[in-house]
Image: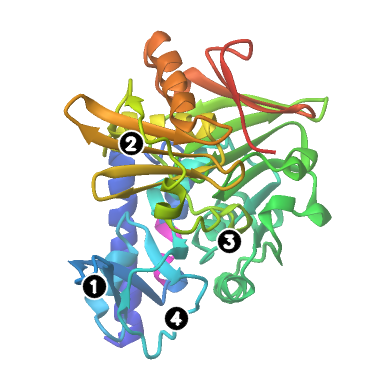
Amino acid sequence: MTASKRLEADATRLRAHLAQLLAEEGQLADPAWRKAVETVPRHRFVPGFYLDADERTQEGLTIWQPVTAERDYDRWLAAAYSDITLITQFDGEEPDWQHPAERYGGAPTSSSTLPSLVVRMWEDADLAQGHRVLEIGTGTGYSTALACERLGSDAVTSIEVDSHRLNQAAATLYSLGHVPDLAVADGLYGYWPCAPYDRIVAACSFRSVPPALIAQTRLGGKILLTLSGWLYGYARALLTVSDAGSAEGVLLPGTVSFMSARAHAAPAFGNPAHWGNALTERGRTARHSPQLINAASEEAFHLRFLAQCAIPNAQMITIDDTTHLIDVVSGSAASLTPNDDGWQVRQHGPLLLWDAVEDAIDTWQNAGRPDQTGFGLTVTGDGQRVWLGDPRGPNWSLPA
């Protein structure tokens, strides 16, 4: 058997296994999406990627190992058809997959999202045959290929801010017979030439809903996107566009995160020690522990998003035992340090950051500690509000 025939046979077998696994987990309720997963060769979109070596440097940085067919065929193909995210780029720098090297630390800036989440996003967007869809964040092109397989290429427009990424995705898509509309464009502004759309699905996250996306969606059309922010809290929102050019919808359950749109990435805040110099010498005992939003739990995942709604311009970092909150917009800061009474909070600036977080947590507890599905989002010309219970309930404004 030739190498190419072996690859095709191995990939076909692994695709069928992946589809079966996702179906058993309830991820492929629509048979058409299962057929797409069984058909689209994910390995063609990821000639190289990085996997966590489960090791750290002396400085505590993650060691990332490059994986290609040439280096380790079995590991490469098995990972390509595993339900995991494959990191393909760090810090906006395109790797040389002919001569790949280990990486130490760095911020992932492009990836092939785990297949279960890709399908979940398409299914949650309530797509149907005949819909025209805009995908924001082409990435490797695998997700785009699934949509083309399901809806037909003529129904799909996909945009990507990184021209090199898009060129690679386009070459693979076209080689497989998929010819969607592709463009280098910033997801903040959608893509007017192919509008209007019945569905817009974003594979990156935003601090607030870009107005251009609402303007480019048909009356009654839907937008599925992930909200994020500088505390790295996340929530998915499914919005329906109304005749007033506004949109409203609910937050969806689960712990899903996407890389931020590059224009919405957090700014550098400097040295936390400098911010700490202005804090009050004597603080108070905190009503709530920062562990409520820092713990590795689904509830903390949700509460971090709620905290972010309360202080949308703040960032958080923990050094030794102290958690720092830093707001580069207002100049406000806070620190929380453990002591015998729990946590001591010290604050400075026009905004009392931890007070705002505690008030939001109190509101959530008084409402019975609902999960994400107890919240919604309303977008109008007057602003964007995340609300609890119903649009007239407690609410928090997203950044403009």
Q: Is residue 288 visible?
A: yes
| Residue 51 in picture, x, y percent from top left | 29, 68
Nearer the observer: mark 3 or 4; the answer is 4
Considering the numbered disc 3 on the image, is that residue within a helix, a strand or a loop?
loop
Considering the numbered disc 2 on the image, is that residue within a helix, a strand or a loop?
strand
Q: Amino acid at mark 4?
A: Pro
Q: Amino acid at mark 1?
A: Arg
Nearer the observer: mark 2 or 4; the answer is 2
Q: Is residue 190 visible?
A: no
Q: Looking at the magenta stretch, what is its main secondary structure?
A: helix
The residue tagged 2 is: 336
**Which mark sits nearer the N-terminus, 1 or 2?**
1
| Quarter in which the N terminus is drawn | bottom left
**Which mark sits nearer the N-terminus, 4 or 1?**
1
Q: Compute the Cα span from label 1 to label 2.
A: 44 Å
The residue tagged 3 is: 138
Q: Compute the Cα span from label 3 to label 1.
A: 25 Å
| Crowd rating for badge 1 (residues with CA inside 10 Å; few <14, some 14–19, many 20+) | few
Highlighted range, magenta: 38-43
Decide: is 318 above or below 2.
Answer: above
Decide: is 375 above or below 278.
Answer: above
The residue tagged 4 is: 95
Nearer the observer: mark 3 or 2; the answer is 2
396 relative position to 180: left or right: left
Which circle marks residue 157 in the picture? none
| Quarter in which the C terminus is drawn | top right
| Residue 3 in picture, x, y percent from top left | 31, 86
**Which mark sits nearer the N-terminus, 3 or 4?**
4
Considering the numbered disc 1 on the image, is that residue within a helix, a strand or a loop?
helix
Q: Amino acid at mark 2?
A: Leu
Q: Compute the Cα span from label 2 to label 4.
A: 40 Å
